[in-house]
Amino acid sequence: MTTISLDWIASPEIVVGKTEHHRLTVVALTHVGERGNADLLLYELDRARIIPDSMVPTNVVRIGSIVRYAPVPGAERIAKLVIPDDATGSAGYSLAVTSEHGAALLGTRPGQQMSWLDRNGEVQRLRIIAVVNDDPDDDPGPLAA
């Protein structure tokens, strides 16, 4: 069963840099049929607004971002968004972009909320609280609980 967002109108606009979009499309196609949600990632990549890499705002979730988010309902979590092959090597807080939450977080910004139907047809939601990227000007303060 394909995992998709509830509808295009309810989903917030997401942005992805051109280089990362290409790289993640290859990752998603490589992982189709494996455990994970490569289909949700492909859906999100398809609806993303693709922009030049230099124009991606510093508060947008991308590979390498550290994100504070919360499933609705649920407790807040902090995770680093990674390529699936890198997910096992970083002290348990890494989140593969092909996972359900990883795919839903890609391209979002703090204050946005994503909704989608999971493989069982259940509505899932998460809200993005804070994002920190490798930009030295980013302040990691918002991640502190």
Image (cartoon, grey):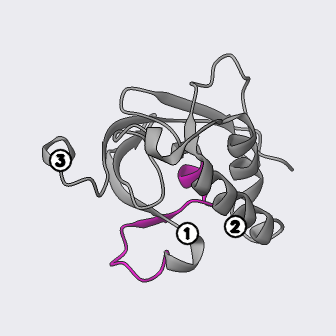
Quadrant of the rendered image containing residue 35: bottom right
Q: Position of residue 103 (x, y in %)?
A: 60, 50
Q: Residues within 10 Å of mark 2 (few under 14, many from 20)?
A: some
Amino acid found under the numbered disc labelled 2: Val
Q: Which residues are magenta?
A: 87-103
Of helix, strand and loop, which one carries label 2? helix
Residue 138: x %, y % from top left: 20, 46
Task: Name the residue that disc number 1 marks.
Answer: 83
- Read off the residue under disc 3: 137
Question: Which residue appears at 55% of the width and 32% of the height?
Answer: 114
- CB within 8 Å, label 1 to label 2: yes
The first of marks 3 and 1 along the sequence is 1
**Residue type beneath disc 3:** Asp
- Give the image location of residue 63, x and y in percent: 48, 59
The dot on residue 27 is 2
49 vs 39, left or right, is left
Residue 111 screen position, x and y as percent:
37, 26
Disc 1 marks a residue whose amino acid type is Ile
Near-viewer residue (59 or 137): 137
Tell me the element at label 1. Answer: loop
Vertical position of residue 8 compared to residue 58: above or below: above
